[in-house]
Amino acid sequence: MDRHLTVAAESDDISASSTTLNDGHGLSSRTAIFVWLLASGTTVMSMVLALIGDDRTGAMLGILPAMTIMMVGSLKAWLILRYYLGLGPSADGWRGLFIAFLIVIFAGVLAAQAAMILMNR
Amino acid sequence: MEPDQDTIAQHDDSGLMDHDPQSASDAWGGLEALPGHPLMWVLILSELVVFGAFLLTFSAARIGDPAGFANDQLHLDRVMGGINTLVLLTSGLFAVFAVRAIKKDAVLQCRVWLAGTAVLGIVFLIVKLIEYGTKIDAGIGLETSTFFTLYYLITGFHALHVVMGLGVLGVVAIWPNLTNIETGTAFWHMIDMVWVLVFPVIYLLR
């Protein structure tokens, strides 16, 4: 695998200087691996936090822990959209549409959590 | 529009092909700037709307029975869900390397990365089947509760997309040109992205 990564890294300059429409998707190996590390790291972190705080009683999470969990999920989704799917260089309108999709899910899930917390008081 | 020499040149003998900027721009209103076939992005957008609606429905249903949902969620294995997230994230990285390989005309290397992506997709399905098996052995089925109806529906529909994604990867591996590989891997990344949203909503939030 190392050889593959080395070869890919060496071709970064070639990708960057090419003039195809898909230049924006000429993601460098370093960036791709960094995105993977960040997404994987936050996944492991959220798993560990969930297991540490897992009292198996099913107690409802407060709004801040819920917001943190959803922010981590949304961040991973955005990283995939921006870097792996290659949304970065797209027109503002399309990028806005995809961001709006993430915001609607984020806000909708948190609104439900907030409603449950309020009803539980 | 008459195809010009540059457009013709893009369809070379190597099988590599790129979009025609002018005609694509006319036809797809900006989607042509994205990797892969523009129609795949229309599909991706519609899939995101469907899964978004599922997740919002799940959250709305939780409001009606928070205690029941929290109790049912205790039967889910968060470690398995987390492992599957890591598996899909890694498969996404492999898919990126497949695109990079085809951009260098390294068809064999591209197929190796695609195979790695597909193997991880199969690992995801195996982990999911183990999870389903554990639930079914415990007598937890589709009609056990609203939580599990939605759990099976959302994760099952997602798993079905993984199966479809494996088929798409197989097809583009047989005909590996740039547009095909970008289109196939875009579908795979969409599956990956949906899962990173499904995992916290179903497995972690309570």
Image (tube, rainbow, N blue to C red):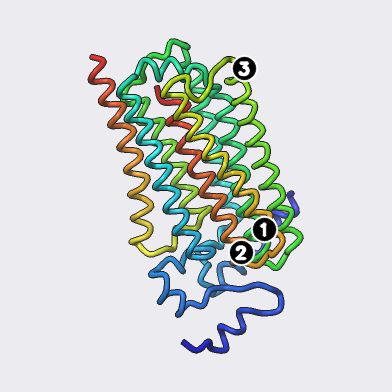
Asked if residue A21 lies left or right of residue A8, the reply is left
Q: Evaluate if marks 1 and 3 touch, with contact meaning CB atoms under 8 Å apart.
A: no
Q: Which residue is mark 2?
A: B180
Disc 2: host chain: B
Q: Which residue is mark 3?
A: B137
Residue B40 placement (x, y as % from top left): 50, 60
Q: Evaluate if marks 1 and 2 touch, with contact meaning CB atoms under 8 Å apart.
A: yes
Going from the N terminus, do you reach mark 1 or mark 2 first?
Answer: 1
Identify the residue at horizontal 62%, vertical 17% (top origin). Answer: B137
C-alpha gap between disc 1 and disc 2: 9 Å
Residue B164 placement (x, y as % from top left): 60, 48
Q: Mark 1, mark 2: which one is toward the viewer?
A: 1
Q: Residues within 10 Å of mark 3 (few under 14, many from 20)?
A: few
Query: Of helix, strand and loop, which one carries label 3?
Result: helix
Going from the N terminus, do you reach mark 1 or mark 3 first?
Answer: 3
Q: Which residue is mark 1?
A: B171
Disc 1: host chain: B
Asked if residue A55 lies left or right of residue B62, the reply is right
Going from the N terminus, do you reach mark 2 or mark 3 first?
Answer: 3
C-alpha gap between disc 2 and disc 3: 41 Å
Above/below status of A12 relative to A73: below
Residue A5 placement (x, y as % from top left): 69, 53
Q: How many marks?
A: 3
Q: Amino acid at mark 3?
A: Asp
> What numbered label is drawn on residue B111?
none
- The quadrant in which the C terminus of chain B is found is top left
Residue A25 placement (x, y as % from top left): 53, 61
Q: Amino acid at mark 1?
A: Val
Q: Nearer the viewer, residue B139 or A88?
A: B139
Above/below status of B48 relative to B23: above
